Image (cartoon, coloured by chain):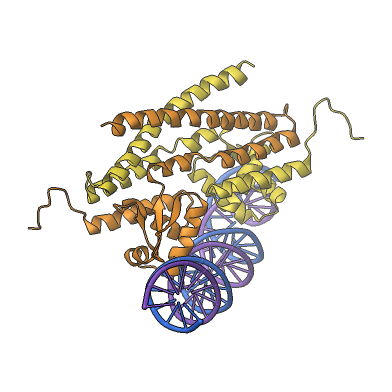
Chain colours: A orange, B yellow, C purple, D blue
Amino acid sequence: MTEETGRPERDPEGVSRFVEHFAAQLVMAGMPRMPARVFAALLVSDTGAGGSAELGETLRISPAAVSGAVRYLDQQHLVSREREPGSRRERYRVHGDQWYEALTNREAVIRRWQDALREGVASVGPDSPAGRRLGETLAFFEFVEKEIETIMERWRAHRDETFGRG
Amino acid sequence: MTEETGRPERDPEGVSRFVEHFAAQLVMAGMPRMPARVFAALLVSDTGAGGSAELGETLRISPAAVSGAVRYLDQQHLVSREREPGSRRERYRVHGDQWYEALTNREAVIRRWQDALREGVASVGPDSPAGRRLGETLAFFEFVEKEIETIMERWRAHRDETFGRG
DNA sequence: CGTTAACTTCACAAATTCGTGAAACCAGCG
DNA sequence: CGCTGGTTTCACGAATTTGTGAAGTTAACG
């Protein structure tokens, strides 16, 4: 029997399975493979952060792959880079409990959908059948944009209640 | 000057621009190129439907490409196929004003995220820092899953008010 | 029952994407 | 001021994806 620590131990095999399964979800959501795996690996790390070497080893990928993945994640605002002063090691950190907010906060993305739809309405005419269909879709996006803000506020309240002073 | 019809005319060039721009958004959201273009083309058509030949011509793609695209869209429940009795022409139709509901109603998808996260919590232990982070993320997805239902109800009410008896 | 029109399937060629190894780069440290 | 460990950039080879042409399938018509 393994040593009892008073706290359940990490199950390396299970962790690895999680990384791959969670990464698969991210890939299905449109994220490239390597960034997805790196992000998942950071998520399960106790510190929520890790260096290039560490990530490369656990995922069995080259430093170059880690570098590329981190660049992507950085651009998506899903991780931040930290320079530990005194060491040339760099640390990549998941944005704590806010990364999923970033996922939903795709304000610029929604804006582009709306722009495209407005363009469509203009080019078919707002009173044509197609124009009405596009107009309604546009209204949907505008509605959702507002509602998402509301949801996030409600979530923060719910989170504070559940975790903040749990 | 072109003939006045009493209703603004379709601007073919503008329509084409819309198709490409809207398709680009879909591609960024993870949809393959051809399905995205076919879907956009159906969206701007006045009837909301079209045959393989018609789509192939306006998009300048082969019948095979249309076929593949439609198969994809059908699997995603974004279009339905209709057999016009009496003609061997098949019609593909966008699910009217409900396609974007399908986009957000990814119940099965959310479920898979949750499953992956539960697996992660189990393998690192719920009381570890990583376990707490994953647990909170899981709570977020559970929260969102419920909220989405609420949003869609509110949307339908809002839509009926705005369009239903506008 | 053969012909024909529309759609689908299949195999291949083209184009992208992906990850690696190797070289370049950068910042501490001696 | 040169060394050293760590990260990034670059170019290439591999693997996956994508769209096409051509053959195959199905169903309406004469």
Location of residue D18 in the rendering, given as x and y in whole percent from the top left corner: 58, 58
| Image coords of residue A111 (percent x, y) | 61, 38
Farthest residue to the top: give it: B165
The answer to whether residue B49 is visible is no
Q: Quadrant of the N terminus of chain B?
A: top right
Quadrant, the C terminus of chain B: top right
Q: Nearer the viewer, residue B166 or B64?
A: B166
Quarter holding residue B5: top right
Does residue C20 lie above or below A133 as drawn?
below
C23 to B80, vertically: above or below: below
Instruction: Return the x and y of residue B27 as percentages of the image width and height.
Output: 57, 50
Q: Is residue A78 visible to the viewer in this orientation of the structure?
A: yes
Residue at the right extreme, as displayed: B1
- Residue C22, given in percent of the width and then of the height, sits at 48, 82
Compare residues A26 and D18 and report the one nearer the observer. A26
Q: Is residue A58 above or below residue A43?
A: below
Labels in figure, total = 0
Residue appearing at x 10%, y 53% in the figure:
A4
Q: Give whichever of B52, B69 is nearer the camera.
A: B69
Q: Farthest residue toward the left?
A: A1
**Residue visible at 54% across and 49% down?**
B31
